[in-house]
Amino acid sequence: MQEYLQGLNDAQREAVLHRDGPVMIVAGAGSGKTKVLTTRIAHLMASGVDAFQILALTFTNKAAAEMKKRVTHILGNNEARNLYIGTFHSVFARILRAEADKIGYPRNFTIYDTDDSKSVVKTVIREMNLDEKHYKPSTVFNRISGAKNSLITPEEYINDYGLQQEDLRANRPLIGQIYSSYCKRCFKNGAMDFDDLLLKFYQLLSTHPESLSKYQRKFKYIMIDEYQDTNTSQYQIIKLLGAMHENVAVVGDDAQSIYSFRGATIENIMRFQKDYDEVKVVMLEQNYRSSQNILNVANEIISNNKGQIPKKLWTSNDEGEKIKLVRTATDNDEGKYVADAIQEQKLRSHYRNIDFAILYRTNAQSRSFEESLRRMNIAYRIYGGISFYQRKEIKDFLSYLRVIMNPNDEEALKRIINYPARGIGKTSLEKAVLFANQNNISMWNVLERASEFGYKASTLEILSNFVIMIKMFQSELEKKNAYDLAILVGKQTAIVKDLFNDKTTEGLARYENLQELLNSIKEFTETPTEDGELLDKSLGSYLQQITLLTDADDDKGERDVVKLMTIHAAKGLEFPVVFVGGLEETLFPNAMAINTREELEEERRLFYVAITRAKAKLWLTYANNRYRFGNLTQNDPSRFIDELPDDRLDKSFAGGNMRNNQTNHWNAFDKPKYPFGNNKTKETKPEKPAYLVSTPVIKIKEHTPSPDFAPSDTSNLQTGQKIEHQKFGFGEVIKMEGAAHNPVATVKFENNGEKKIMLNYAKLRIVE
């Protein structure tokens, strides 16, 4: 037996040794599919197949490089360099360079990235005199991309009744014409976009028989990794290339098909057996990653899907710990629980930060986890996205709030002066900076006195309107709390509306992120201290909190970090300890993905992917209440929780009335218990913004509760009543306000002055 076959299980060996004819390798999570794929390539080459005759297609450059490296290691020579291993786009681009003249392109054609493509779309929209707000370049580009991935040309698009009706309903009937003009422009420029690398290659094969024959003969053996993630164009290309020899080996897992929003279709792997005669099917069901308990939960979950290739993962690993199901009161409590659990596991089981992953359905969910990890000084990193407070839409919005508090904040001012676009161009901005420097005044002063600096009339009007808007916001500072002012900013600037109207995947994510920011501000204004006291909830106070939260040192290449990422970004990865957050209806499964059985089953596959990332320990968490769209909403647990097997769960953290459990209450904006770097202020440092200036701390005169102290029912508390507070002592209720479900009492205490007390949290004894 060849040395490289040692260490393979029976199913893996069967997949490797099957040489000729189509084979479908159904590789369950953690079953060693990369090992099988690379060993199969090595075996073909060891059996006399020329490396030049092997085509292996992946979805990432990293996976391709890893496969090449492993093949080289197995064979012990450099023949692997002759393999056609790479992503669909890189391999097809390589071939198109040699064949481009046949489809009218220069061999040195340019490849446009997404930004380039959107820029061309934008130019076309402008030339057609269409409203950019209505025909958003990103929306139009996504529509064009979807058409190309479905192999639909501009002519076919314009003549397709269904597509035209969809565009009419969206009130964008001219997308077909834009698509046509866009393609002509790219062709004239000698450029292809990413989608063209697939579409043009398909067109080359389907319209030039000599090219098709050439590459069918060349690629005698074809292998495709992650076949469940292929789209229509990739599927059709593989069918054409493999039609001569039919030595097509596909590796994939239908249970991990989660990219339909990118055009991937699970149907490709489901119908593979129908596409070829005498397909050999090899099931890789032995898992080398996870404990048996984790696999039992995963098997149980995925069994609820009707559209699947039946399989049952098993392992020779230990049974392992039960999966912990955790219910918390709020999303902030969820973040606190996870951070506490990480700290406990580090101390108890000697795990490092790098051993932990926190997975969630949408990027917006990272906030509560980030804040809690920062408070506990646990190093972390956002993968597949950037830190919540570093996201452009968040920084833009916070810049508005910073300018309202301190209009001399030049960095924030430059960020928002033309956002959303109001016609203040780069030249006008540069003039303002120049005039400020020349006259030793702030940029804001220049804007206030714009008429003195030679701006033309149209620009003057725009600048004046901007200044008036900011001053209007400033006039509300004393009247409104942080949340009410933030809502006013969102409405008056049209930022929220603008993001809401952008229905692209990116636009929806940005809108969700902004809503999450507003949620955090709302929570700040409604969250008391542990004593129930409602402190300063002004914008300045909020910005101070945020500054402290985000002022921590950036990750300086620290590798030992907790990883935070969406479940989509976690696919293909594994971690010793995994937390899956936000298991609530309308969040996971997502409200946008439960309209059809197909959508719901993809959400369940996404949950399956999340579970199977865990090697040793798994926590599933959800919150009773979560701030969404400015309101504290009560959530139903995810339907997926009902599908979990009871005998594999530890529900000790999922019971009890969490809302009334005050011992575990967590205030997201408690003062951090650890330093955020060196906070010593140098004498030369400019004056702090208003919101960073410390207010004098008033010392509390401690009160010893009466021997007979017992909290009273305060649901009917009235103005004029006398009360006793555990900490602040005796006082009189002088004002009642707030919503019925969240009443706030203003109490004048004998020894501690006036304080606002949230009755849902404070323990008061009614004296009279």
Image (spheres, rainbow, N blue to C red):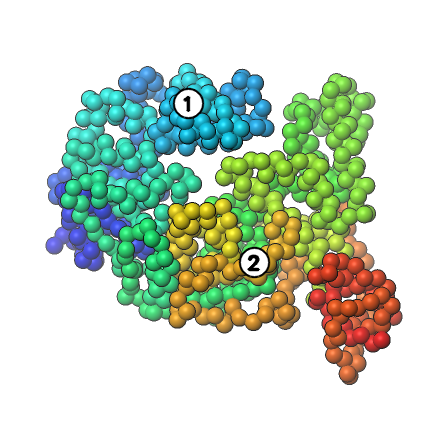
Quadrant in which the N terminus is drawn: bottom left
User: Does residue 546 appear to the left or right of 14 in the view shown?
Assistant: right
Q: Which residue is mark 2?
A: 635
Q: State which tag comes first along the sequence, 2 or 1.
A: 1
The answer to whether one can see residue 542 in this image is: yes
Residue at image coords 80%, 70%: 728
| Percent of width and height locating residue 536 | 77, 56
Residue at image coords 49%, 50%: 590
User: Does residue 60 appear to the left or right of 277 in the view shown?
Assistant: right
Residue at image coords 53%, 70%: 655
| Percent of width and height locating residue 52 | 20, 34
Q: Which residue is mark 1?
A: 158
Residue kind at label 1, given as amino acid type: Ile
Q: Looking at the image, is 106 positioned above or below residue 118?
A: above
386 and 589: which one is in front?
589
| Percent of width and height locating residue 387 | 55, 47
238 and 63: which one is in front?
238
The image quarter in which residue 217 lies: top left
User: Which numbered circle lies on residue 752?
Assistant: none
The answer to whether one can see residue 350 in this image is: no
Which element carries disc 1, helix, strand or loop?
Answer: helix
Residue at image coords 21%, 26%: 212
Q: Looking at the image, is 129 positioned above or below residue 599?
A: above
Quadrant in which the C terminus is drawn: bottom right
122 and 289: which one is in front?
122
